[in-house]
Image (cartoon, rainbow, N blue to C red):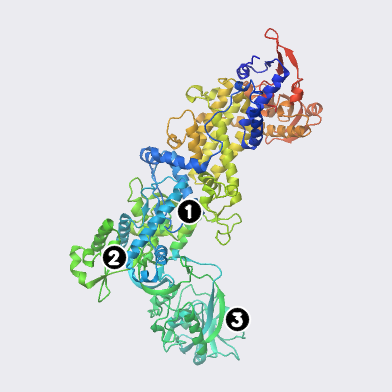
C-alpha cells in the first residue's frame, strides 16, 4: 500500500486541527502503533532495554514478514556515542588521543588567562597507591581542569618524596648480612635511588590511569640534582638569616630507626600503657623561705614525685613545682616509707590516699615558691639536686604535683634546666641502651625494656618506691617502624622557630584556609611548636653542608661554602658529598683548611626536603607562579607539609608559599572504619577502574566512576567508600550518560549555524528550560569556585533527573520523533537540547573528562579537537531574564502536573485508562492568578505550551468550581495545595473520542472515509502525535 509520511503531515498540523492519517486496513493501524512503540523503546533509558531486546529478537525473527512500513516516517535518534562506556578500553584510548594531539600542553601555553598554580604535595615513593591517593589526585585534577576551562594557563607538576628512612630500610631488607657489612654509603644511596625511581614510575602509571593531566614526563623528585640544589639554597638562606643553629637538646629519638624524628614523623596509637611509679626523694636541706613548722620536719621529710618513664630516673637533675600552687606535708601512720613525711599537692591528697592505701594526715601547708632551693638526695646515686620552679605544665590533674625533671629527656625539663643551669644527663645511646654513665648496673640495658625494669627494682631496693601501676596514655611511636620512641638529648641541627614564630603566625593570617578550621589548627601548632630538629642520622638524604674541625668539633658553614656546595650538587647531585674529597668540596679560599676538617654526615629531615618544594618547583619551573595559588592535601598536613612549607617559606623568603590551603579528610569504609588488610575492607582504586577476574563481582567501572565518587562526597571531613557506594555512583553515572546519549541522538540532524532558533522565538516551556539551565551553570560555577564539588554533583543530578528526564524530555518526545525534521516546534526543542549539551559538557568535564570528551567527539558540528579547548561558556543574559512571576507560575504548573500524575496513576491502577493519552484532565484552581494561567495554557499561543502536552494527556479543561470537577470526575478527584497559590482540584476521566489503548480496541476504533482523496479508511486522532505513544 501507499504509506503517507506521517511525520511530515503532522508537521503541518495547527492547534485545534484534527489530523487524519490514511490506513486501508485496521491491521495497518495496529502495525503502525507497534512500530512507533518499538522505536520509542529503542531510544528510552536502560530500565526498558530488557524489554527492547526481547522485542528486537521477535522482530528479527519475522523480519521479512513483519517489517513496519512506517519506520521511515519517525525521526529516530542517531549518534555514535555508545550507551555503554566500555571504560576499560575507551579511557586509555582517550588518553592517547590527548597525548597525541598535545591538548594539555597546548592549553597551558595558549590559554589567554593568567597562570594558575596548584602545587602538588609529594607522595612518598614507597609502595602502591591506595584510595587516599586517588581522592587527593582526582581532587587536584578536577580543580586544574576547571581552571583550564576558565581559560587560565594551568601547568601541573606532579612530585615525589624520594629520600628518607623507609626507602633506606626497604633496600637493607633486600640485602644479606654479608652484603650489608660490605655496603658503603654511596652504594646504599645508589640502591635507594634505583628503588625510588622504580616506585615513582609504578605510581606514575597508576596516577595517569585516573585521567590526571600533568607533566608526567618531567615530574619533580626530591632526589633530582636541581631539586637538591634548591633545597640547599633554602637551607643557606635560613643560615644567613640566623635561623639555623647546632645544639644539644632532647629530641624525639627512634631507637628502632636510630635517628631523630620530627613531630610529623610521630603517631600516637590507642592502647599504650606505661609502667608509672611514685618515688620518695629524701630531703637533705630545706630552703630558708620554708615555714618554720615545716623546717622542723625536714630531717624526716621527702618529696613525692611521679613519672611514666622510670628509665629517666638516673638522669634526674631536679624536682620542679608550680610556684602558684599550694602544697602540703602529709604523714601516714604505719606506712613503710623511707621518711615519715611526704610533700604532695594539696588537691591530690584524697586520690593519693586511694592509690597508696593509706590515710594521709596533713601536718603542714606551704606555697610552691617556698620549696625553691630545697635540696634532696638522688634516690639511686650519691648526688644532691635542687627543687626548682617549673611552668604552667605543672598541674594537679595527675601525679603528685611535683615533677621529676631530667633536662636530657624532656622538652619542658630542658627549658627549666636551661633556666636554672641544670646538668643535662642523657645516659642513653642510639639504640636506646643505657651507657656507662648510668653506672655498670644499668649499662647495656634497653630503656624501653629490661632497663626500665632494672631501675624500678633498684628503687624498690632503696626503699624509695611508693607505688608502681599501669598507666594508659598517649605515647609517641615512630610512624614507620610502629615502635615507641624516647626523648634523648643529642647534638643536632635546629631551625630556630622561636626566632621567626611571629612572622609565621602573621603569614598564616594572609592565607585562605578551607575549611576555616584549618587556620586554627596550623596556628595552634605553630604557636606551640618547639625548635625544629632538621638533622637525621641516616645516609639516604640531602646532607647538611657542614664541615667540622677534627680536633675541636667547631663547625665550618659560611655563605661561600654553602654556595660552592650548592653549585656542585646542581651538577652532580648530593652523592658528590659522599664520594668527593673534602678539598674539592671547599671553595678556593678554604681549600687550605681541608686537612683539619671532616665532613658532617647528618642528612636533612625529609620534611625539610618536601618543605623546600616551593623553591625547587614553584619558583624553579617555567609556567608556575609564586606564591602558589593552592596547596591541597590531607588534614594531617597542618603539622606536616603545610607547616614545613610555611616555616621554610617564612624563614628563607619572608612569606607563606601559598595563597590558599585546602584540606580533605581520610577515606573510611562504608561502616566508617579505617581500612586495613586484616579487616578485608580495603578498596583498591585499580580494582574499581580495571575490575577483577570475576567481572560480575568486580566490574570494571572505569576512572570516571571513581572520579564521580570523589565529586559526590563532602571531602572536607572523612569520607566513606565501599562496593555499595560505588554501585550507587555508577547508577548516577549511567543515568547521566543515557541523558547525554539521548540529547546527542535527537540533535543528529541539527546544525546550530542554520537551525538555531533565536531566544525570543522560543515557546515558553523552552525558555523555562534555558532559565533552569542558566541557573544550573551559575550554581555549578559558584560551587567549583568554592571547591564544593558535591554541590556540582547534586545540582547536575537534580537537573538531569527531576527537570530533564521527568519533565522536559518527557513532554518533548512527540516534537522530536514525529514532527517534520524542520518543523519549527522541533527545531525549538533541538535548540534547547543543543544548549544543554553545550553547557553540560564543560560543566561536568572536570569531573568526567572521558565521558564529556566522548560526548564532544560525537557532536556532528564542532570547531575544536577537545571539549577542553572549547572552554567554559558564559550564559546569555536573556536566559536569566525570565520574569519572577513567570518562574513562579511555572513552579505552580509543575506542582499541578505532579498532582495530575498522581490522579492518573490511580486511574491506571484501576485500569480505567492505560497511558495518560487515554485521559482527560479537569482542573479548578482557587487562586485567580493560577486559574487564569491554567486557562490560558489550555489553548496557548504556541501549541507546545498547551497543558495537554505539558501533562501528556489528550484533553485538559478548566472549570469554575470544585463541585463541577467532582461532578464530572466522581471517582478520580483530589484536592492539593499549591505553594503560594491556594489549592488545586484535579479530576481524571476517560478522554473523549478515545476508547482504549489496547491493540484489540484500536482495531475497532472509529474509521471514517477520506473524502476526495482515496478509498482508504482513516483514524480520527484528537491529539495528533501523542495518541500514537499510548503504548
Q: Position of residue 957 (x, y in %)?
A: 73, 24
Would you identify the image quadrant in which residue 886 lies?
A: top right
Q: Quadrant of residue 608?
A: bottom left
**At 21% from the left edge and 63% from the top edge, which residue is drawn?**
587
Characterize the local packing of mark 2: few (<14), some (14-19) or many (20 or more) Cα atoms within 10 angstroms: some
Q: Which residue is mark 2?
A: 578
Position of 903 relative to 337 (above/below): above
Most distant residue in the top direction: 1012
**CB under 8 Å between discs 3 and 2:** no
**Mark nearer the N terminus (2 vs 1):** 1
Q: Which mark is residue 355?
A: 3
Q: Is residue 528 visible?
A: no
SS class of the residue under badge 1?
helix
Above or below, 893 relative to 307: above
Task: Please indicate, yes or no, whether residue 158 appears anywhere in the rendered image.
Answer: yes
Provide the secondary structure element on which disc 3 rests. Answer: helix
Q: Residues within 10 Å of mark 1 (few under 14, many from 20)?
A: some
- In the depicted view, which residue is nearer to us: 273 or 403? 273
How far apart are the two marked residues, 3 and 1, measured between alpha carbons?
A: 49 Å
- Kindly identify which numbered label has been placed on residue 133: 1
Residue 973 versus residue 381 in the image, above or below: above
Amino acid at each position: 500500500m501507499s504509506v503517507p509520511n506521517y511525520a511530515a503531515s503532522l508537521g503541518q498540523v495547527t492547534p485545534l486541527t484534527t489530523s487524519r492519517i490514511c490506513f486501508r486496513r485496521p491491521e495497518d493501524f495496529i502495525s503502525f502503533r507497534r512500530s512507533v512503540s518499538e522505536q520509542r523503546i529503542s531510544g528510552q533509558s536502560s530500565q526498558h532495554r530488557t524489554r527492547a531486546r526481547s522485542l528486537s529478537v521477535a522482530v528479527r525473527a519475522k523480519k521479512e514478514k513483519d517489517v513496519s512500513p512506517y519506520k521511515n516516517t519517525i525521526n529516530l535518534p542517531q549518534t555514535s556515542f555508545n550507551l555503554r562506556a566500555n571504560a576499560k578500553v575507551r579511557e586509555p584510548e582517550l588518553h592517547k588521543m590527548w597525548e597525541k594531539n598535545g591538548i594539555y600542553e597546548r592549553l597551558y601555553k595558549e590559554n589567554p588567562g593568567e597562570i594558575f598554580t596548584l602545587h602538588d604535595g609529594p607522595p612518598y615513593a614507597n609502595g602502591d597507591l591506595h584510595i587516599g591517593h586517588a581522592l587527593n589526585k582526582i581532587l587536584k585534577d578536577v580543580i586544574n581542569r576547571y581552571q583550564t576551562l576558565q581559560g587560565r594557563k594551568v601547568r601541573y607538576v606532579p612530585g615525589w618524596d624520594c629520600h628518607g628512612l623507609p626507602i633506606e630500610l626497604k633496600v637493607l631488607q633486600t640485602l644479606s648480612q654479608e652484603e650489608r657489612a660490605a655496603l658503603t654509603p654511596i652504594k646504599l644511596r645508589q640502591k635507594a635511588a634505583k628503588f625510588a625511581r622504580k616506585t615513582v614510575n609504578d605510581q606514575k602509571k597508576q596516577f595517569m590511569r585516573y585521567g590526571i593531566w600533568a607533566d608526567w614526563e618531567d615530574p619533580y623528585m626530591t632526589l633530582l640534582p636541581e631539586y637538591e640544589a634548591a633545597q640547599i639554597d633554602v637551607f643557606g638562606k635560613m643560615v644567613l638569616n640566623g635561623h639555623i643553629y647546632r645544639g644539644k637538646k632532647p629530641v624525639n629519638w627512634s631507637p628502632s630507626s636510630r635517628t631523630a624524628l620530627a613531630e610529623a614523623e610521630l603517631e600516637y596509637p590507642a592502647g599504650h600503657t606505661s609502667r608509672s611509679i611514685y618515688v620518695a626523694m629524701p630531703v637533705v636541706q630545706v630552703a630558708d623561705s620554708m615555714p618554720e613548722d615545716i623546717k622542723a620536719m625536714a630531717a624526716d621529710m621527702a618529696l613525692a614525685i611521679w613519672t611514666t618513664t622510670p628509665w629517666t630516673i638516673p638522669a634526674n637533675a631536679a624536682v620542679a613545682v608550680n610556684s602558684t600552687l599550694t602544697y602540703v606535708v602529709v604523714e601516714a601512720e604505719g606506712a613503710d616509707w623511707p621518711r615519715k613525711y611526704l610533700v604532695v599537692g594539696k588537691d591530690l591528697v584524697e586520690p593519693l590516699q586511694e592509690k597508696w592505701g593509706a590515710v594521709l594526715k596533713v601536718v603542714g601547708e606551704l606555697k610552691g615558691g617556698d620549696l625553691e632551693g630545697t635540696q634532696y638526695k638522688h634516690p639511686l646515686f650519691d648526688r644532691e639536686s635542687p627543687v626548682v620552679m617549673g611552668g604552667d605544665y605543672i598541674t594537679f590533674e595527675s601525679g603528685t604535683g611535683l615533677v621529676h625533671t631530667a633536662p636530657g629527656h624532656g622538652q619542658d625539663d630542658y627549658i627549666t634546666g636551661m633556666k636554672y643551669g641544670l646538668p643535662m644527663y642523657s645516659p642513653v645511646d642510639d639504640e636506646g641502651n643505657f651507657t656507662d654513665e648510668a653506672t655498670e648496673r644499668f649499662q647495656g640495658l634497653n630503656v624501653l625494656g629490661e632497663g626500665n625494669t632494672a631501675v624500678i627494682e633498684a628503687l624498690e631496693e632503696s626503699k624509695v618506691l611508693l607505688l608502681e601501676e599501669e598507666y594508659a596514655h598517649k605515647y609517641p611511636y615512630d610512624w614507620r617502624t610502629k615502635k615507641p620512641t624516647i626523648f634523648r638529648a643529642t647534638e643536632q641541627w635546629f631551625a630556630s622557630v622561636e626566632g621567626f614564630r611571629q612572622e609565621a603566625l602573621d603569614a598564616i593570617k594572609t592565607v585562605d584556609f578551607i575549611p576555616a578550621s584549618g587556620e586554627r589548627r596550623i596556628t595552634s601548632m605553630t604557636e606551640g611548636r618547639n625548635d625544629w630538629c632538621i638533622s637525621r642520622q641516616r645516609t639516604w638524604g640531602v646532607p647538611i653542608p657542614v664541615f667540622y674541625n677534627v680536633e675541636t668539633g667547631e663547625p665550618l658553614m659560611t655563605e661561600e661554602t654553602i654556595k660552592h656546595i650548592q653549585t656542585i650538587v646542581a651538577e652532580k647531585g648530593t652523592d658528590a658529598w659522599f664520594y668527593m674529597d673534602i678539598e674539592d668540596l671547599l671553595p678556593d679560599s678554604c681549600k687550605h683548611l681541608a686537612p683539619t676538617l671532616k665532613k658532617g654526615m647528618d642528612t636533612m629531615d625529609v620534611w625539610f626536603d618536601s618543605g623546600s618544594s616551593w623553591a625547587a618547583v614553584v619558583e624553579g619551573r617555567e609556567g608556575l607562579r609564586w606564591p602558589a595559588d593552592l596547596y591541597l592535601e590531607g588534614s594531617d598536613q597542618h603539622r606536616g607539609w603545610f607547616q614545613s612549607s610555611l616555616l621554610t617559606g617564612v624563614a628563607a623568603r619572608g612569606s607563606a608559599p601559598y595563597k590558599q590551603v585546602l584540606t580533605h579528610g581520610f577515606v573510611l569504609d562504608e561502616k566508617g572504619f579505617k581500612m586495613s588488610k586484616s579487616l578485608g575492607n580495603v578498596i583498591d582504586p585499580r580494582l574499581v577502574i580495571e575490575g577483577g577476574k570475576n567481572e560480575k563481582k568486580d566490574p570494571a567501572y572505569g576512572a570516571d566512576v571513581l572520579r564521580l565518587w570523589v565529586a559526590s562526597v563532602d571531602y572536607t571531613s572523612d569520607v566513606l567508600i565501599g562496593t555499595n557506594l560505588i554501585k550507587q555512583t555508577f547508577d548516577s553515572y549511567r543515568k547521566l550518560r543515557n541523558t547525554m546519549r539521548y540529547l546527542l541522538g535527537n540533535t543528529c540532524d541539527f546544525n546550530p549555524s542554520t537551525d538555531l532558533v533565536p531566544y525570543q522565538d522560543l515557546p515558553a516551556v523552552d525558555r523555562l528550560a534555558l532559565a533552569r539551565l542558566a541557573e544550573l551553570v551559575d550554581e555549578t560555577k559558584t560551587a567549583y569556585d568554592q571547591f564544593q564539588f558535591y554541590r556540582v554533583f547534586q545540582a547536575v543530578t537534580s537537573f538531569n533527573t527531576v527537570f530533564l528526564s521527568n519533565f522536559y524530555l518527557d513532554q518533548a518526545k512527540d516534537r522530536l520523533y514525529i514532527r517534520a525534521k524542520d518543523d519549527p516546534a522541533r527545531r525549538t526543542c533541538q535548540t534547547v537540547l543543543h544548549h544543554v549539551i553545550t553547557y553540560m559538557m564543560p560543566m561536568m568535564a572536570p569531573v568526567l573528562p572521558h565521558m564529556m570528551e566522548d560526548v564532544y567527539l560525537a557532536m556532528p558540528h564542532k570547531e575544536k579537537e577537545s571539549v577542553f579547548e572549547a572552554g567554559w561558556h558564559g550564559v546569555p543574559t536573556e536566559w536569566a531574564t525570565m520574569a519572577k512571576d513567570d518562574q513562579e507560575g511555572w513552579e505552580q504548573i509543575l506542582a499541578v502536573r505532579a498532582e495530575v500524575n498522581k490522579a492518573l496513576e490511580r486511574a491506571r491502577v484501576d485500569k480505567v485508562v492505560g497511558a495518560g493519552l487515554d485521559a482527560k484532565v479537569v482542573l479548578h484552581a482557587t487562586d485567580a492568578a493560577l486559574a487564569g494561567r491554567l486557562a490560558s495554557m489550555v489553548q496557548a499561543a504556541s501549541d507546545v505550551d498547551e497543558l495537554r502536552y505539558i501533562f501528556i494527556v489528550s484533553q485538559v479543561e478548566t472549570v469554575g468550581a470544585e463541585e463541577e470537577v467532582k461532578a464530572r470526575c466522581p471517582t478520580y478527584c483530589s484536592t492539593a495545595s499549591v505553594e503560594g497559590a491556594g489549592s488545586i482540584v484535579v479530576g481524571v476521566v476517560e478522554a473523549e473520542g478515545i476508547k482504549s489503548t489496547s491493540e484489540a480496541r484500536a482495531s475497532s476504533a472509529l474509521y471514517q472515509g477520506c473524502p476526495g482523496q482515496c478509498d482508504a479508511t482513516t483514524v480520527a486522532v484528537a491529539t495528533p502525535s501523542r495518541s500514537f505513544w499510548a503504548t
